Image (cartoon, coloured by chain):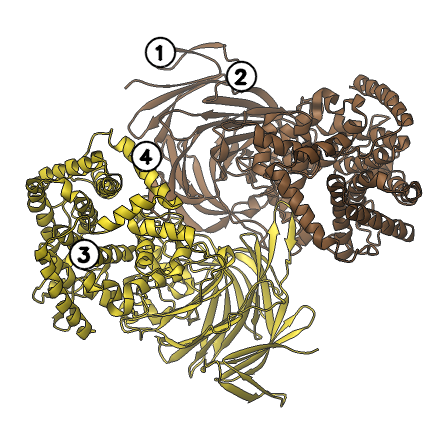
Chain colours: A yellow, B brown
Amino acid sequence: MIGSRLLYMVTLVLGLNSFLIGQEHPNLLLTAEGVSRIKDECCPRLYQEVLDKAILEFASVLEAPMEVPIPKDMAGGYSHETHKRNYGLMRTAGMLFQITGEEKYGNYVKDMLFKYVELYPRIDKHPSRKSYSPGKLFWQCLNDANWLMYTAQAYDAIYHFLSLAERRTIEEELLIPYADFISIENPKFFNRIHNHSTWGNAAVGMIGLALNNKELIQRALYGLEIKKDISLEKDNDGGLIYDGDRAIAGFFAQIDYAFSPDGYYEEGPYYHRYAMLPFMVFAQGLNHHMPELKIFEYRGGLLIKAVKTMLAQTDSKGEFFPINDAQKGMSIAAGSVVTAVNIAYANSRDKEFLLAAQLQNKVLLDQSGFEISKALENISIAGLQRSSTEMKDGKDGNKGGLGVLRWGGGSEEFNVVYKYTSQGLGHGHFDKLSYSIYDGPTEVLQDYGAARWVNIDQKAGGRYLDENQTWAKQTVAHNALVMDQKSHFDGIYDVAKSGYSIPIYFNAANRDLQIISAKDTMAYKNHDLERLVVLWKDDEFDKPIVIDIVRAFGEEAHDFDLPLHFAGQFLKADFKYQSNDPEILGDSHGYQHIYQEAVAKIENPSISMTWLKDQKMYTLTTKSEINDEVILARIGANDHEFNLRRDAFMIHRKSKAINPSFISVIESHGSYNPVTEIPHQPYGKIKSIESILESVEYSVFDLIDVDNNKWRVCINHYNGESNAIHKIEIPDGHKISWTGPITINKLKN
Amino acid sequence: MIGSRLLYMVTLVLGLNSFLIGQEHPNLLLTAEGVSRIKDECCPRLYQEVLDKAILEFASVLEAPMEVPIPKDMAGGYSHETHKRNYGLMRTAGMLFQITGEEKYGNYVKDMLFKYVELYPRIDKHPSRKSYSPGKLFWQCLNDANWLMYTAQAYDAIYHFLSLAERRTIEEELLIPYADFISIENPKFFNRIHNHSTWGNAAVGMIGLALNNKELIQRALYGLEIKKDISLEKDNDGGLIYDGDRAIAGFFAQIDYAFSPDGYYEEGPYYHRYAMLPFMVFAQGLNHHMPELKIFEYRGGLLIKAVKTMLAQTDSKGEFFPINDAQKGMSIAAGSVVTAVNIAYANSRDKEFLLAAQLQNKVLLDQSGFEISKALENISIAGLQRSSTEMKDGKDGNKGGLGVLRWGGGSEEFNVVYKYTSQGLGHGHFDKLSYSIYDGPTEVLQDYGAARWVNIDQKAGGRYLDENQTWAKQTVAHNALVMDQKSHFDGIYDVAKSGYSIPIYFNAANRDLQIISAKDTMAYKNHDLERLVVLWKDDEFDKPIVIDIVRAFGEEAHDFDLPLHFAGQFLKADFKYQSNDPEILGDSHGYQHIYQEAVAKIENPSISMTWLKDQKMYTLTTKSEINDEVILARIGANDHEFNLRRDAFMIHRKSKAINPSFISVIESHGSYNPVTEIPHQPYGKIKSIESILESVEYSVFDLIDVDNNKWRVCINHYNGESNAIHKIEIPDGHKISWTGPITINKLKN
């Protein structure tokens, strides 16, 4: 990788010479050519909508007095929100100036820039000192970087509308000093490998491009050259500035370090969505300005890949899988994702981005928005379905991964999300080998997400809640195996941060029978965990069946809990349970937040239970052993401030077990309509599981349906090759053989 | 009323003479004239959709073998569902035959009728004996009545397509005997005042109309003449057959007794929706066949009024208010409501029905469906808003009522539903003076509805659950005042059934300040209850504010609980509370199902708390007294089968209080977007309530906002006249005066 960066540095130096021969404007997200195309071919529907909306908004904006207050407030407060609104308006006005040619928009930007020229020398650092790097207009440099990035675009758009003297004033009294402020004066903000720094790099870089300022571009791409300073080494999110003795900083370094080779972002999609914007915006500016840099081809086309990977981590309605710290409901509707999708499409013409844009149903006002809007009208994506995909984690792609199995498409798309990643930095959860299921928009098995109500002041100011640590991060809060009622890595981040799981195989070659196998050797001392997740679609079932095998290997007997977060209305179980007044299950590792509402001592070799969620019915059928317990549980104990959702779940418990195995089937079978009052298939078809053979290498078992039909499932746990041939003898003496990691066959009665 | 019925009887006798001079076909829901209009003016969009869908459905129906199985199964089983499907198909085929003129549809009906001609003499009563009146094709006569009503329409449609001999066979061997079976042979089914009997009457009547059979029509309109027989007096729903010595039965009697003069259906909208269909279908048939009967004008146009009243009991998305036993989610999308709306519109041309039809977005295949579909395209209803309305309960309109206050329209419509009805027969709840609030589709304060998962087999076969009695019907399950932790009427139906509340006044003359006052003198011995509900919209608030005053009058001190079922995510309170492990609040009257999760001893004269529901924020501010308690509670104790929803609520408790009063304000202020992560107005504006004067007749208090602005609220509890002038002196010696039941004025600082 170092080699490739050096190569790019050479390219850049050559590129810089082009500065000497003058520069076009606009040339960031808009180019002269792009603007002319927009004017000539206006307008496809979505683009027309965003254009109309912007023009309408400005009808009143231009009437209102321009407000550029003295910085004072935190996020949510008047000065913060006004400056935030201002940079958005400036950028929009710049674009409208280019597209419509109307001077009123150019004047708006100019006037506002001069108001900031006036303000800037009068203000010191923001009076609030709650950030490690307070900004000027805002309480943290991060927001100032936003301001600069947007303002760079506005300035670029009206460049030729300004006199030379005006440009000099704006550049020398506002833009350059401000870019220096967030970089040279704030190295801890600017010079890390961190999403904050990406914003910083991109902001400085965009100003550099807009001003044709070689030094700023250089700084943005390669960081500050500063000596190793221990006090900068680590920030509160764990981002490093040095790799050994070598300073790692700047935009290229962010691309190198923030993503895995597959474009997976270590912290997961919720933060990926947030971080993606500066990468794409600056890259687009670079690509227009210095096309010879081929930034979208850097690191194997990493940036485009990263957008695809981000989109791959969404459900059928475009909401991000809430793995790690994440607020549920965050989706591709977010502005940053619209930006990323538009720019990624403009620079790749990959149809997958059109699927996302269709769901987003909105586009940017720039030329990438115009292009994707046109494409949506001219290119058919009907019937296009998203693929299953595995995304490897880790800078070099060798620290686990995330697998997503998909079936069907559109609003009915079925997703199985299996997580065997690394820890995910400070936002990671202790949830090795956990998984979740989505049946269209329905979370069949949920990931709780973060215990946080983002920006809702009543809940600890909208910050992470204590329960994020005590509940949401803990293993039992996930569909993940818990040993001895202790979280993975004992719930200690400093132990977990270097841990990661190991992909065994991922085979989605046959869309009707897909399988992922992975293991973890680090979460528990002296114990290996394995999980294998199967998505199986058979004509006899309306929807895919999920098969889930969890195993633990170790020498001594331990207690194992496998939680299943169905978070719906329990309907019925085929085992007897004893309900009780809520009892708190433990005092640590998340158990202090669990109420036991009922418990069952299992007496059968297979059990099942059905629940209702979003007016659909689901049945879990699982292999059991005598003395297993099932705990019907609910979240909410010791939740003194009512911070947690009171969701229901169950725990399958095996006490004092050696090498336990859990084999489960989750069937999505029924639905209910409260208007017609007709339930469709309220009962699952599969009623039990019968184990035939379980060895380290193989699992063979039968799924038995209500009419006593049997499907035999044969699995090899370690060999995912589609053409590998397996031959084994089962206990009744029969020999069976099959090809590939898994086969499922209906047995003849 | 007797007089009016006699008058109608005379009219009918005259009408019957028209039989002698021959009859047109079709003449039930379709007429020759209507069919010709459909053919000439086809087709408005919604009608075209339903027509296309029917033709498409029959493309495969006509290919498939016709199945007419021996009756055997209960609802959900093969024979039941097949016969049910068959009558629907016959009716549709009959309509398609008329509209398209294609013989294949006529042949389909004919062939199927002859299959039933064959089957009918071979079957006895249905083998299942789970109903008080087993049918022939179905387990209960009710379904057989459905079959007859639909089949009458099919037969009528192909009448002229059949030979005289074919008609004679079908009439004499199938239709007449079948009509006799559900009437003469099942008097307990046919001859009551009950929705089942309405179906029976209508079915026999429709056969009578289709066959021009005077005797059947007579029987349908006036019931069977049978002697008083004690065993028929009461069914399990409490319907009576005799009023004194006089037999009360037949279609006219149903209209007389099932509704109040305002068209309110005693059991509430959930059952109203179900019962309305046979009324409207038979009435439409009668009106086409015997227009001289003026059935839609009977009892002051009661039937049309009843449809309006039914629709008035829905929220902005068309879901019925779940008062009494009701399954949430039941809505005007139900087929029976589409039928009622279409027929009501065709016979009234009232625009209000177009609002409903627009929301339903579907119409009938008959000519009423055609008419309303045309009207939706030709008549503008943009901006039309629904009115606030009061519906008096009781056959003579003197047993309480239901008030609905509305503000705004469309999907943002705000509804306050105040219930001061009679008990609602066996499906009633013990919830005198309870109320609920809807902010668009959001239940701000919920009515729990019934504890029942209709037709979901896993939950007690889909029948009413035990918890319906032990929880859902109890007073504490509602937003209603509870005295001494005992339900109204001690929770005893036989005591409650003759009880009803008393409307004091209803004033919605000013849409920005609407008020209802009502009282109850029967729910508790020696105590009167009063509640006054106000909907107030001021420009300084985004949405309406609800003011709620609850008072109790009696001589001794008692304990009072005012529950508030917010059923959302508690965000924050301005009082200190102590959370605890769930404690069960009592052992009867619903309290056995309540967990206390936290409790607060109140030390302030005013308290407030905020919750989140459907990403919107609401704040309750309520007057309090020292030693009041607030219990933060949750439903779910002693719910051994997980039948109940674990919804959160709160209880404001005043112990050993004499003549307590609760003054509360519910402010709908905020919203949250998980994609932008921006909360809009997360805090309520009103922060406290200050009581100025409370007398029996008057309440004067101030609402104080976060900026210490004050709004003074002056209310007279008993005089609702808009022009009544009130003059009082408040404790500080000031004299104040206002006009009307309520005034709210912002005080000058």
Q: Secondary structure at mark 4?
A: helix
Q: Is residue B482 visible?
A: yes
Labels 3, 1: one chain: no
In the image, taking residue A434 as reference, residue B43 lies left or right, namely: right
Q: In the rendered structure, which amino acid carries the disc numbered 2?
A: Tyr
Residue at the image position 37 percent from the left and 43 percent from the top: B672
Q: Is residue A115 above or below residue A34?
A: above
Q: Secondary structure at mark 2?
A: loop
Q: Position of residue B615 (x, y in %)?
A: 42, 43
Q: Position of residue A434 (x, y in %)?
A: 42, 67
Tell me the chain of label 1.
B
User: Is A745 or A595 nearer to us in this picture?
Assistant: A745
Q: Quadrant of residue A418?
A: bottom left
Residue annotated with mark 3? A289
Q: Is residue B475 visible?
A: no
Labels 1, 4: one chain: no
Q: Is residue A280 above or below residue A518?
A: above
Q: In the rendered structure, which amino acid carries the disc numbered 4?
A: Leu
In the image, taking residue A640 as reference, residue B246 lies left or right, namely: right
Tell me the chain of label 4.
A
Give the Cα separation between the discs numbered 2 and 4.
Answer: 51 Å
**Residue A56: which disc?**
4
